[in-house]
Image (spheres, grey):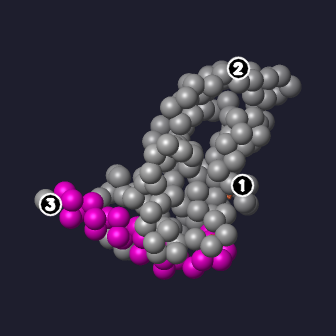
């Protein structure tokens, strides 16, 4: 185990959305603050900052994780995807992002980046997920203004389309 001095910055190397970064991080620096304040990727939102709302969800090594519960030094040597990495600016929206738009699955959009990160992992890793499973994943996220039906409908549409495409 490597013990870190609390009063010193430590060099970390991290890959974010396919791009390598080398930064100095104090041991108490949260991953949310690394992403937003140091790197400038503000698509990852901070709401509760104690693991409840899901707004800060990113992929670490492909798995959805709460960035507000992760220290920057913990991602040394790891690969992270943020909402900006789902569909880089030159690319079209992902199927899930398009479905969110079609089903009015967002209003203010504050919760949306975290939802997209969790649900994109779901549709990729569990193509046979049913509505109950989608709602189970949604239970890890709070949306204060949209209501969840449009989000469920968007995700179910993507799952159905994947199954149709896989069957042809
Ligand atoms: Fe991380 Fe709410 S800001 S779960
Ligand atoms: Fe506003 Fe979810 S769209 S909090």
Tell me the quadrant of the picture where the N terminus can be found: top right
Q: Nearer the viewer, mark 3 or mark 2?
A: 3
Position of residue 138 relative to residue 42, above or below, is below
The first of marks 1 and 3 along the sequence is 1
| Up-down relation of residue 45 to residue 41 (above or below) | below
Q: Which residues are magenta?
A: 142-167
The image's mark for residue 167 is 3
* Circle 3: element type: helix
Question: How many other residues sit within 10 Å of disc 1, few (<14), some (14-19) or many (≥20)?
Answer: many
**Type of secondary structure dominating the magenta stretch:** helix
User: Is residue 156 on the magenta stretch?
Assistant: yes
Task: Check residue 102 for magenta coloring.
Answer: no
Question: Which of the two residues, 140 or 88, is positioned nearer the viewer here?
Answer: 88
Q: Is mark 2 within 8 Å of ligand 1?
A: no
Residue drawn at the location 67% of the way across and 63% of the way down? 110
> Which labelled disc corresponds to residue 26?
none
Q: Position of residue 100 (x, y in %)?
A: 48, 67
């Amino acid at each position: 185990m490597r013990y870190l001095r609390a009063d010193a910055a430590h060099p970390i190397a991290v890959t974010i959305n396919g791009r390598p970064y080398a930064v100095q991080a104090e041991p108490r620096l949260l991953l949310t603050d690394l992403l937003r304040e140091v790197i400038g990727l503000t698509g990852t939102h901070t709401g509760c900052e104690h693991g409840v709302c899901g707004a800060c969800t990113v992929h670490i090594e492909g798995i959805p994780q709460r960035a507000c519960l992760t220290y920057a030094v913990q991602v040394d040597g790891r690969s992270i995807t943020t909402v900006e990495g789902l569909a880089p600016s030159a690319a079209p929206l992902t199927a899930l992002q398009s479905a969110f738009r079609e089903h009015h699955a967002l209003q203010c959009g504050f919760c949306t980046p975290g939802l997209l990160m969790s649900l994109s992992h779901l549709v990729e890793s569990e193509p046979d997920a049913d509505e109950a499973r989608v709602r189970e994943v949604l239970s890890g996220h709070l949306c204060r203004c949209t209501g969840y039906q449009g989000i469920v409908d968007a995700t179910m549409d993507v799952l159905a389309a994947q199954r149709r495409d896989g069957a042809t």
